[in-house]
Image (tube, helix red, strand yellow):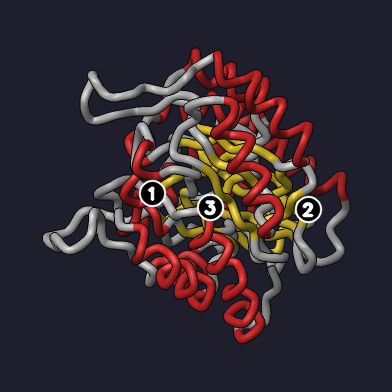
Amino acid sequence: MLILMKSNASAEQLEAVASRVRELGLTPHPLQSSSRSVVGVTGERNGLDPAVFSALAGVSKVVRLSVPFKLAAREFHEDDTVVDVNGVTIGAGQKLCVMAGPCSFESEEQVLTIARTVKQAGATVMRGGLFKPRTSPFSFQGLHEDGVRIMQRAREETGLRFVTEALDERSLELVIEHADMIQIGARNMQNFTLLKKAGQSKKPVLLKRGMSATLEEWLTAADYVLSEGNPQVVLCERGIRTFATHTRNTLDLSVVPAVKELSHLPIIVDPSHGTGYRNYVPPMALAAVAAGADGIMVEVHNDPAQAKSDGAQSLFIEQFQQMMKQIPAVAEAVGRTL
C-alpha cells in the first residue's frame, strides 16, 4: 500500500501518518522525493481498508501497489536511487561504475598486480572473493580471513573500493567490517535471513540475480534488504540458466530496461558469469552499456591459466585494458561517461 501525501503536507503530518501505520501493527516507510512525499506500508494486513488512512490530514490518496515487490518498485520511489560505495556513486545517470578483479583472492602478489592494473585502466571498485561458494566441496574455497590483510593493503595503495561476497552470517560480519560493499551471490539471492542481516548493516549491497530467478523474484529479494531500512541496493544481472549450451549461462540484457521501468534501483551487468568465456565478455560488456546498465562487473586475472577459480572467463590484463578503451565511445552514444 502507498499513501501519497499532498504537495503542501507538513513533516508533522507525514509523521502522524507513519505513527498511525505503526499503531495498526504495520511498518511505515516514509520517503520524500523531488516531486512528492509518500509513506509505503508493509505488513500482514492484506484486507486493510485504505480509508483508514485517506481521511488523515495531509493525505492525497491511498493506492495499492500492483506488483509483489513494494519498496523496490518505481511506484514507491519515482526518482532513481543513487548508491554511494564510499564515494563511488552508482545509478541515476552517474558515471558508469566498472568493477573488476579476480574471481577469488589467491595471493598478495596476484591481488596487488590486478588492483594496480584495473585502477590504471579506469575501474573504481575491485571485486574479489574472500569466501567462494563452489559446486564441489573439494574446490578452492577462498582465503577467508587471510585475505583481509591483502584487501586492506590493495585499498591503501590504489584507493579502490572493494566488494566481496558474504556466504553466511559469520562471513557477513567480516565483510561488513572490512569491505566497502556486500555482495550477495546468485546462490543466496533468496537466503532471506542473510538478506535481512545485510539490510541491517546499512552498508551498500550488491544483489546478484539467482540462476533461475524471475525479475519479480529478484526485486522481491531486494525488498528484504530495503525493508530493514537500507536503501543502498545495486542489482547485478549475471546470467540465468536456459537450454542454451554455447555459454555458461544466458546473459539477459533485456532485464536492464525492464528493471529501469519497474524499479528505482541501479543495475549493473556481469558478463563474465553471464557467458563463461573470456572472448565473449568484452562485446557483452559493451552491449550492457548500450542497454543502459549503470555499470559492469568483470573478472580479470594476471594469469588465467593458473587461476584457482573461473580462469576460463577471466580476462587477460591486455583484454581488460582494450575493453576499457572501447567503453567510452559506447557510453557517449547513450549519454553516459566512464
Location of residue 21 (image quadrant): top right
Residue 200: percent from the left, percent from the top? 61, 26
User: Mark 2: few, some, or many residues within 10 Å (few <14, many ≥20)?
Assistant: some
Q: Answer few, some or many: residues within 10 Å of disc 1's Cα (few below 14, many 20 plus, some between 14 and 19).
A: many
Residue 307 shows up from this direction:
yes
For image coordinates 23% across by 30% down, the residue present is 135
Taking 175 as reference, is 35 left or right?
A: right
Q: Residue 209: give its label.
A: 1
- The answer to which of marks 1 and 2 sits earlier in the sequence is 2
Alpha carbon distance from label 1 to label 3: 14 Å
Three-letter amino acid code of the residue under disc 1: Arg
Frontmost residue, 227 versus 108: 108
Secondary structure under badge 3? loop
Q: Residue furthest bottom?
A: 333
Vertical relation: 93 (above or below) 211 = below
Q: Amino acid at mark 2?
A: Ala
Foreground: 337 or 304? 304
> Could you say which disc has been placed on residue 310 in the image?
none
Residue that numbered label 3 is attached to: 72
Which residue does the image show at 58% across and 55% down from the upper left? 2
- To which residue does mark 2 refer? 57
* Residue 172 pos. (x, y %): 53, 21
Horizontal and vertical percent position of residue 247: 22, 60
Q: Please name which of the two marks, 1 or 3, marks the residue nearer to the observer.
A: 1
Question: Camera-side residue: 125 or 209?
Answer: 125
Answer with mark 1 or mark 3, whichever residue precedes in sequence: 3
